[in-house]
Amino acid sequence: MNNKAIGVMDSGVGGLTVVKELIRQLPKEKIIYFGDSVRCPYGERSTEEVIHFTEEIFQFLSRKDIKVFIIACNTATAAAISKIREMTDIPVIGVIMPGSRRALQISNNNDIVVLSTRGTKNSHKYKSTIQKINDHANVLEIACPKFVPLIESGDYKNKKNRDKVIDETLSNLKRTSADTVILGCTHYPLISNYINEYFNNEKNIVDSGFETARDVSTLLEFKKLLSNRKSEVIHDIYVHGDYKQFEQILNEWMPNFKYTIQSVEL
Amino acid sequence: MNNKAIGVMDSGVGGLTVVKELIRQLPKEKIIYFGDSVRCPYGERSTEEVIHFTEEIFQFLSRKDIKVFIIACNTATAAAISKIREMTDIPVIGVIMPGSRRALQISNNNDIVVLSTRGTKNSHKYKSTIQKINDHANVLEIACPKFVPLIESGDYKNKKNRDKVIDETLSNLKRTSADTVILGCTHYPLISNYINEYFNNEKNIVDSGFETARDVSTLLEFKKLLSNRKSEVIHDIYVHGDYKQFEQILNEWMPNFKYTIQSVEL
């Protein structure tokens, strides 16, 4: 048993899709979240920059005495997870492996599409992770650079703008033989219903957040790190830069979430 | 990377539902399986007996130099997993935690039914495991002592006999508010379609095998124990007692499975 917090980082609000599942699947766990909104999106930045940002945030959250560090951002997982694992003895969990594992669990034809930022796509981490487990899996990686700005701005609630971006981005996939689509960016679950509709609800949609929370549960249990907290949990949110837009999306997305929030500089 | 085999045990053919998922989700892994057919079913035996059998089988498989030991039997997991973990440094994975975790992941109302043998039911291990993670989950445990004999005998293929057993066993659950049903015995996935139909396809059905394979994948990756085997894998099956009935079910259930099989005494 261990009642320390779970540290979670993302470039912005996307990692909240992981947090939402963590608190649902592991209601006794306390979350300390860092959203790097001022430097979002990470998807178009260089690998070196993303590694540097992730290290900074890891160091910030380490000072809060966390028992596990979750990189709830695919771009940062692809760029920096090996580096962070070298820096610490606590478990470091990214979002690429859980999503890959679920895709291999659920796909019937091992024909898988991955939607992600350009940074994640160029790393080919999904392809290599999936094929490390199954050489015969077919993995098509698609960059969707307009999705994160659409979501962080809140503009995804405007049907016309949303449809335009989704249609432009996914039009080449209309006839794909893949039966499974990985949302390879933690922002995308906020528009997963629309992506699902775009594919006529005919694909398995894999949500990294949903799957990462499950793997965190597996590891906490196996390492005897589950919390036995009895009291109500108040989670802590740190936002790099102004948190107004962040908090608005947080409240819409997780209306019953109990939290403190503050702006921080690094 | 580690190309040793995964050791899997069950009281009989039930653990093959775990193996089927292991080879699908982790095609590079080799399985060494032990089916204790001559002493099956475990569900009506005393805890002491089940512990003793599980220890014997663990010792048998240990001599084959395995990297992880899977107790693919709920009754044996409930009775013996703590004991086996004390005996070894390799990871020991049971089937109760993965199924519990999946139920908490997929249920919308945290109202969960567990179908199991009498031994598993009386241990209340599902209830305690689920509530360890979420105090507010409601867990109803139902013993289904006629299911394993129905399956091991092959009689589940006879519609009349099958319907009679399922109806007798589950009739009290017709109006349950639970939205999720855990198949808390690895034999039950062989009749999961019929159980699903009994509930008018309205419940989430959780298959321990499907979920255990996923958790094995998580742990092998996290502990850097995944295989990078390139050649075709031939799995090894050991059956305690005669293997004729065992092999017949194996061939029907997994027609493309490549294996050697032999009878053993303990």
Image (spheres, coloured by chain):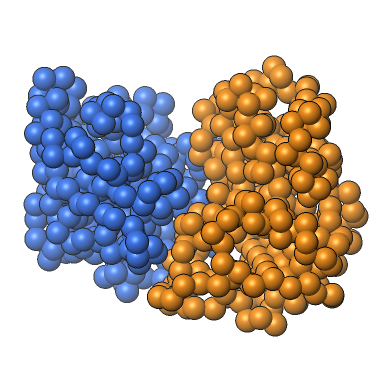
Chain colours: A orange, B blue
Q: Quadrant for the C terminus of chain A, please.
A: bottom right
Give residue A76's position: percent from left, percent from top.
Answer: 76, 57
Q: Residue at x 64, y 51 (%)?
A: A252
Res. B210 image quadrant? top left
Q: Quadrant for the N terminus of chain A, please.
A: bottom left
Q: Is residue A172 left or right of residue A260?
A: right
Give residue A60's position: percent from left, percent from top.
Answer: 75, 77
Residue closest to the eye, B145 or B260: B145
**Would residue A24 be visible to someone looking at this image?**
yes
Q: Please count the marks in the image.
A: 0
Give residue B142's position: percent from left, percent from top.
Answer: 17, 48
Q: Is residue B251 left or right of residue A183?
A: left
Residue closest to the eye, B66 or B110: B110
Q: Residue at x 18, y 62 (%)?
A: B123
Q: Considering only vertical position in the picture, is B61 above or below A198?
A: below
Q: Is residue B44 left or right of residue A52?
A: left
Q: Residue at x 34, y 61 (%)?
A: B136
Q: Considering only vertical position in the picture, is A6 above or below A11?
A: below
Res. A204 image quadrant? top right
Give residue A81's position: percent from left, percent from top.
Answer: 72, 62
Q: Residue at x 65, y 43 (%)?
A: A189
**Would residue B230 be visible to someone looking at this image?**
no
Q: Is residue B156 left or right of residue A264?
A: left
